[in-house]
Structure formats: C-alpha cells, structure tokens
Amino acid sequence: MNTPRTRVQRRPVHGVLLLDKPLGISSNQALQKAKWLLRAEKAGHTGTLDPLATGVLPLCFGGATKFSQLQLDADKSYEATVRLGIRTSTADAEGEVIATNPVNCTLQQVVEVLERFTGKISQLPPMHSALKKDGKPLYEYARAGEEVERLPREVTIHALELLQAQLNQDHPFLRVRVSCSKGTYIRTLGEDIGQALGCGGHLTALRRLSTGAYDQRQTITLADFEAMDEPQRQQQLQPVQSLLAGHLGITLQEDEAGRFLSGMRRSGTWPDAPQVAVFAPPGPNGKPVLLGTGHVRAGELIPGRLLSPIEIQQILEEQT
C-alpha cells in the first residue's frame, strides 16, 4: 500500500539564495529542491548551469524574480578544464567522441592562442544548448539528430588566464580562468581553443566563480542548506536589493513613495541615470524598504519594475 504524500504548505518567501550548484544535477533540479526546502510559493533561477558544471547559481524567490534578468545580463567568471586532443559531439564530457588527434602544441603556442580569444570574439552557439529556434530549444533538435542553422554571436572575453597546462602527458589539458560577458558558451570557447591549437578539445570540468556582484565565497552547498532548519534557511537569503548592485539608490518620502509605487513619475533634482533602485524610508527595523527600479531622465524618476504592496509588506514581516 502506498503511503499518501504529505502536501507541502507553501508560503511567501522573498530574496536570493546563492547556491553552490553540485555536480550532476540540472539548474532546475537544484531550484526545485531549494524551493521545496523553503516551501516557497514562487521561484526562478538566473540562467542555467549544465549538469557537469558547479558553482555560483543565484536562485530568486518571490519579489526577487522580478529582477532576475539583471543576473542573466551580468558578466560572469569561470574556471574551466579543456581536455586536448579529443573532440566530442557536445563539446563536453557528456558527448560521444567524434575525433582524436595528437597534441603537438607548445606552451608558447597556447599563450598566443589564448591571446587571440581575448576581447570581442564570435561564437557559434552549440546545438546542445537552451537557445531557442522557432520556440524550441536547440538541444531538442540535437537529441533528434537534427542540426539547424545558427547565427554567430559576438561576445566579450574580458580576461583569459592560463592556470595550468599539461601538454606532454597521456591526458593533455589546459586549465583556464575566464571572465566574460553574458551569452558566452564556455564549452564552445574550449572547443575553439582546441581547434586553434590544431588538436581539438572538449570541456571536462567547469565551475562558475562569480556572476555580477555575487561570488563563490557567498554560496552555500545544497547539502548544507538541507541540513538546516527552516529559520536557518531563511537567514541564508540575500535581500532582494542585492540584485541591484551598481544601481543608483534613491529614497523617496512616504507620500512620494506611494505615488511612485502606483506607477507615477516623480520630479526631483536627481542626475540622469539609466538604472535606479528606489526605496521608501526605512521601516521599523531600520532597514531600507525597496519599492522597485526605474531610471532618471531630465529630472524625472520613471518607474520600471515595481514590487507590489503585498510583496513589500511580506518582506517587512520577514525582516521582523
């Protein structure tokens, strides 16, 4: 006889969990596990990490989901290991081997190739990716054995540092640290570096070190998070406004805050700013009360993404 499943009583949760995603599970699996552990009503992640990747995965809950796009657009950094001499169908260790070649490059050639991949470069998105064509992820075409036309995309590699190179052993590899713009495929970068060295290559390990203002020193593992009780888990959440690092902060008086929250533009002496985080005066606990985002043009504060009054009240209750 099957035991009836206990229904989880969901609750409003607002904030950002900086998870150190473990190896072997998808970003969505990690999200659903954390959502279940928090009993959160609403959650979303800020861009996927492959199952073979680990590292910084910001998970947004409640009102934080309104600002998750900012992390999708943020610069990121990674540490990656590229196995040289072997190409695979997916450009990583999950794929089938499609070519093997001897590795005859020198350390100087590696350094020169890495320099060529620094700055603005063009990448062809891999077939095994979540990028969509005609509303369907590319990986679905790939699993069906189809290859569809993709257009190259320009991305920026801010820095590409060689951490370790093993070129004359049975398992030649490079270990690199990459700082890059949004939309960079590290699998593709590793494969392209291998091709430029004349031997091919594929990614065998990938760890995200940072995304935007968040880095791995702030993260918690899923196992440690699960071992906590619910109040301790709640304390692990970063405030919603942590997503707005780099925004100009503007605090409105209460009457002006109410009007802004209803979508009305406000006038003031603020400088023009493309990204503004707007707050009401501090609440009873002395902490700033986030209203939402906007931008300032010609002395006008123009609303962007706004929290609802209910969300603001729930956040204030969480802080007490």
Image: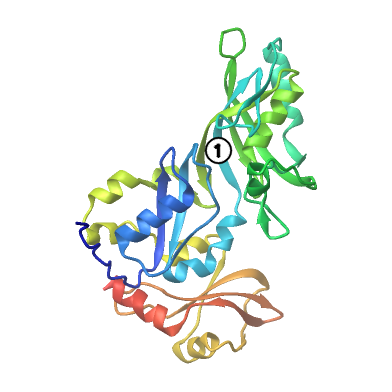
Q: How many marks?
A: 1
Question: Residue 60, relative to residue 77: is it above or below?
Answer: below
Where does the N terminus fall, quadrant-wise? bottom left
Could you tell me residue 282's position as x and y percent?
Answer: 38, 77
The 10 Å Cα crowd at callout 1, few under 14, some 14 to 19, many 20 or more, is many
Q: Name the residue rendered at 62%, 77% in the picture.
A: 270
| 270 with respect to 44 (left or right) | right
Q: Name the residue rendered at 72%, 45% in the picture.
A: 155
Give residue 303's quadrant in the image: bottom right
- Comparing 175 with 316, the one in front is 175
| 49 with respect to 219 (left or right) | right
Could you tell me residue 194's position as x and y percent?
Answer: 70, 24
| 3 with respect to 306 (left or right) | left
Could you tell me residue 237's position as x and y percent?
Answer: 36, 59
The kind of residue on which mark 1 rests is: Tyr
Give residue 35's quadrant in the image: bottom left
Looking at this rendering, what residue extends furthest in the front direction?
1
Question: Residue 320, relative to residue 55: is it above or below?
Answer: below
Question: Residue 197, relative to residue 215: is it above or below?
Answer: above
Q: Is residue 212 visible?
A: yes
Q: Is residue 128 visible?
A: no
Could you tell me residue 165's position as x and y percent?
Answer: 59, 17
- Comparing 136 with 123, the one in front is 136
Question: Residue 23, relative to residue 99: is it above or below?
Answer: below
Tell me the SS state at disc 1. strand
Where does the C terminus fall, quadrant-wise? bottom left
Give residue 71's quadrant in the image: bottom right
- Comparing 35 with 155, the one in front is 35
Identify the image's colour scheme: rainbow, by chain, secondary structure or one colour.
rainbow
Pointer 1: what residue? 78
- Comparing 99 with 239, the one in front is 99
Q: Name the residue rendered at 59%, 89% in the picture.
A: 264
